[in-house]
Amino acid sequence: MSRKRVAVLISGRGSNMAALIEAAKDKAYPAEIVLVVSNRADAGGLNLARAAGIATEVVEHTQFGTDRAAFERALQAALEKHRVEIVCLAGFMRLLASGFVEHWQGRLLNIHPALLPAFKGLDTHRRALDAKAKLHGATVHFVVPEMDSGPIIAQGAIAVRPDDTEDALAKRVLAVEHRIYPMALKLVAEGRVRIVNARCLIDEVFVPLPPPVDQLS
Ligand code: GRF
C-alpha cells in the first residue's frame, strides 16, 4: 500500500512536527511528510523542516486581514498542490472554519496538551496544576468545527507530582505528545481508525490503548 501524503501545519517551534518527520523516516511507516505549512514566516519549525528536506509553504494569515475564507482557500491550494491526503495540526494557532474542517473530516488531526475533554483551550498545564489534577497528559483527536472536541484517537497520561511546576509538566507532557502523535497518525494512515457515533474505533473494536503513565499516585 502506498504511503499517505501528509502535511503538518505549524505556527511555532515544531517539535511535534519533528517527531512526525522522524517517525516517517522509516520506510515502513505508512505516511510520509510531504509538506509543512506555517501561518508565520518566523516559525522555528520551518527551519527544521527545510533541514529535513521537506517542502515548506508560508501562508500568512495577516495577509488576508479578517477574510478567514481567503486564508483557508490559500491553505487548501497549498495542500492540493502537494496532493496532501492527511493534515496534522501541530501547534497551529489558527482556528479553522467549518467549511475547511468538513472538507478534511476524518483526515484532519490535532494534538492538544491535556487529557480532553479536560482543559480545552490554552494554558492547559497551569490549569491542570490549579485544578490539583492527579493525572495530566495529551490527546490526539480528529478536528471538528468545535475547538478541541473531536473524536479521540489516542491519549497519553503522566502523573502530576506535588512539586510540579508548569514548565516541568509541559516538558513531561511534550515527551508524551512526541510518542502518541506518530502512533495516532500511523493508525489513521493505515486506515485502522473508524469514527462511529463520535468515537474512534480502532480495528473495528474499542481498544483503550495503554496510556504511558510514568508513575501512579
Ligand atoms: C504542543 O504542546 C501541542 O500540543 C499544542 O501546541 C504545542 C506545539 O508545540 N497544540 P510544538 O510546536 O509541536 O513544539
Image (tube, rainbow, N blue to C red):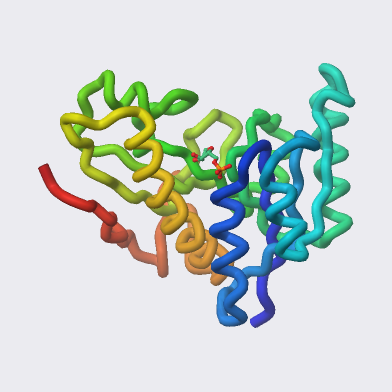
Quadrant of the image for the N terminus? bottom right
Spot occupied by residue 59 in the image (x, y as percentages of width and height): 83, 38
Quadrant of the image for the C terminus? top left
Q: Is residue 42 above or below residue 82?
A: above
Q: Is residue 84 above or below residue 132?
A: below
Q: Is residue 52 above or below residue 144?
A: below
At x 68%, y 32%, the residue is 96
- In the rendered image, the residue lying farthest to the left is 217
At x 30%, y 28%, the residue is 165
Spot occupied by residue 179 in the image (x, y as percentages of width and height): 42, 58
At x 36%, y 23%, the residue is 126
Nearest to the observer: residue 47 or residue 1:
47
What is the quadrant of residue 206 in the picture?
bottom left
Nearest to the observer: residue 153 or residue 36:
36
What is the quadrant of residue 115 in the picture?
top left
Q: Classify residue 61 as left or right of residue 128.
A: right
Q: Is residue 59 above or below residue 128?
A: below
Spot occupied by residue 26 in the image (x, y as percentages of width and height): 58, 77
For the image, the number of numbered tags is 0
Spot occupied by residue 25 in the image (x, y as percentages of width and height): 61, 73
